[in-house]
Image (cartoon, rainbow, N blue to C red):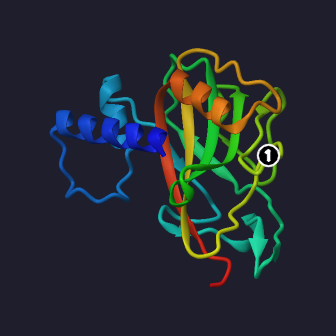
Amino acid sequence: MRRLAVVAVLVLALAACSGDDDGGSTTAAPEDTVASTLAGETLTLTSDAFDDGGTIPAEHAGCVDQQPGPNVSPPLTWSGVPDSAVELAVTVVDPDADGFVHWVVAGIDPTATGLESGSVPEGAVEAQNDAETPGYFGPCPPEEHTYLFAVHALAEPSGLTEGMAAAEALAAVEGATELQAELRGVYDQAA
């Protein structure tokens, strides 16, 4: 929770400094604010599975109707990786569950433009999630939750190791991030 508060304060501070007021929606893409700190660099993140703020399909969930779900990571596509990036990482966090970490994968080649559904590129490394299993753990909330998918352009190697604890892995990625783009998805297994 403290980590989310620090990130929220940083995003608000950057927004105030940028002078770009879009009305203050919490679902606005924070990558626009972060990008302004890198001389106009803009990193974007999208998915063919759901729109920003849209519903995450059940095929990407950890639970469906109180039963185990398919638990397959959604396809992700990004663009605008700065030339200075030495590595990319992808994270998935549930801010509605005190920052529960669903996925941290790093060591992605900075020339990559996305991840296919259910795949991790060769050479990439996955940490444990907060369910204490390695790799992706899809949404499994008791009620509607919002999930924050992010691609991180890292200015230095993350140092992530296979099976690293979720909190340590997330801190390593966030500490090396120079630019990130976010995509929000919503999931409710009862819907």
> 144 or 47: which is nearer to us?
144
Residue 124 spot, x, y in % from top left: 78, 30
Using the image, determine if residue 169 lies above or below residue 87. below
In the displayed structure image, the side of residue 12 where residue 85 appears, left or right: right
Question: Which residue is at 79% across, 59% downward?
Answer: 72
Residue 103 spot, x, y in % from top left: 70, 45
Using the image, determine if residue 23 lies above or below residue 106. below
Using the image, determine if residue 47 lies above or below residue 66. above
Using the image, determine if residue 174 lies above or below residue 3. above
The quarter in which the C terminus is drawn is bottom right
> 132 or 186: which is nearer to us?
132
Residue 150 spot, x, y in % from top left: 55, 44
Give the residue number, with chain letter if any, for mark 1. 132
Quadrant of res 68? bottom right
> 108 or 98: which is nearer to us?
98
Q: Secondary structure at mark 1?
A: loop
Most extreme residue toward the front is 2
Number of numbered tags placed on the structure image? 1
Query: How many neighbours does mark 1 have within 10 angstroms: few (below 14), some (14-19), or many (20 or more)?
Result: some
Quadrant of res 105? top right
In the displayed structure image, the side of residue 118 where residue 190 appears, left or right: left
Quadrant of res 74? bottom right
Question: Which residue is at 64% across, 36% downward?
Answer: 167
Question: Which residue is at 21% across, 54% downward?
Answer: 22
Most extreme residue toward the left is 19
In the displayed structure image, the side of residue 141 where residue 43 appears, left or right: left
Question: Which residue is at 51% across, 16% downward?
Answer: 84
Q: Amino acid at mark 1?
A: Glu
Residue 163 spot, x, y in % from top left: 82, 33
